[in-house]
Amino acid sequence: MNRAPTGIPVLALSMLLLGPWPHPLQVQSPSIEWPASVTAAEKTQLLELAKRAGIDRPKEITTQLIHMPLGCEAIEVRSDVTVDGNRRSWTQVWIGNQDKQYYCTGRPQAPSVGAWVIETDAWTAVTWRISDGEWQRDVFLQGVPYEVAAKLVLAMKRHTFVDRRKANERRIEPMNAVDNEATVSQSHGKYEVMSGRGGSGFIAELSIEGKDVVLLSVATWIS
């Protein structure tokens, strides 16, 4: 059982333990999820490289076959997720292995440990949570306001859209395009919701006409 630090009044200690805290940011648990194929020695090497890239507390480490922009197999390292309301953000970097068949070409003077090489500069990724009761998805937004993205995604989830798809497209479930970390973007006055990683997925094209969400098409994509 934790002991109260000496010199802190009981009332102040109660406020510390019970809150409420005014700051909206929360950082999730630092426990790491590892791919089964990564050995103990490789874990140490990857943690060292992640730290060099600025990620001191990795949260998730996964193997990805990255078609764009790397076109190779890489380890994706993500930091803890910082939560601010519906906004979720983390730092991530891709690390390649020179011994792998689909090793990335690498960057000149890239930091390395053993066979592992940092393939990209670390960057901050941001998703936005869209909820409907207990159901939720975290999506990337590209030039689309959160309120618009929520209107599109929830119309697809609830099947409250106006369906203008071609007959041969209606066999595809629209929600195939709304997996976790789907991307919602806008182009030429229309909206696209795209799912999938590793070179394939689904893409839905929509528009907003007055109060209605109109589903124009749903198709598969392969890179």
Image (cartoon, rainbow, N blue to C red):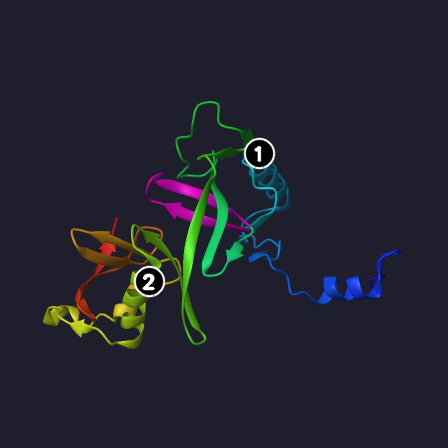
66 displayed left or right of 92: left
Name which residue type carries label 2: Glu
Numbered badge on residue 52? 1
Q: Quarter-wise, where is residue 175 in the image?
A: bottom left
Name which residue type carries label 1: Arg
Identified at 17% across, 54% down, the residue is: 189
| 195 shown above or below 125 | below
Q: Quarter-wise, where is residue 219 in the image?
A: bottom left
- Which residues are the magenta region? 60-79
Label 1 crowd bin: few (<14), some (14–19), many (20+), radius 10 Å:
some
Identify which residue, 179 or 153, lies in the foreground: 153
Identify which residue, 15 or 91, lies in the foreground: 15
How many labels, in total? 2
Lower position in the chain sequence, tag 2 or tag 1: 1
Residue 215 x %, y %: 18, 67
Identify which residue, 214 or 64, lies in the foreground: 214
Task: Give the quarter of the figure containing the N terminus.
Answer: bottom right
| 176 shown above or below 47 | below
Residue 177 part of the magenta segment: no
Q: Which residue is mark 2?
A: 147
Identify which residue, 195 or 133, lies in the foreground: 133
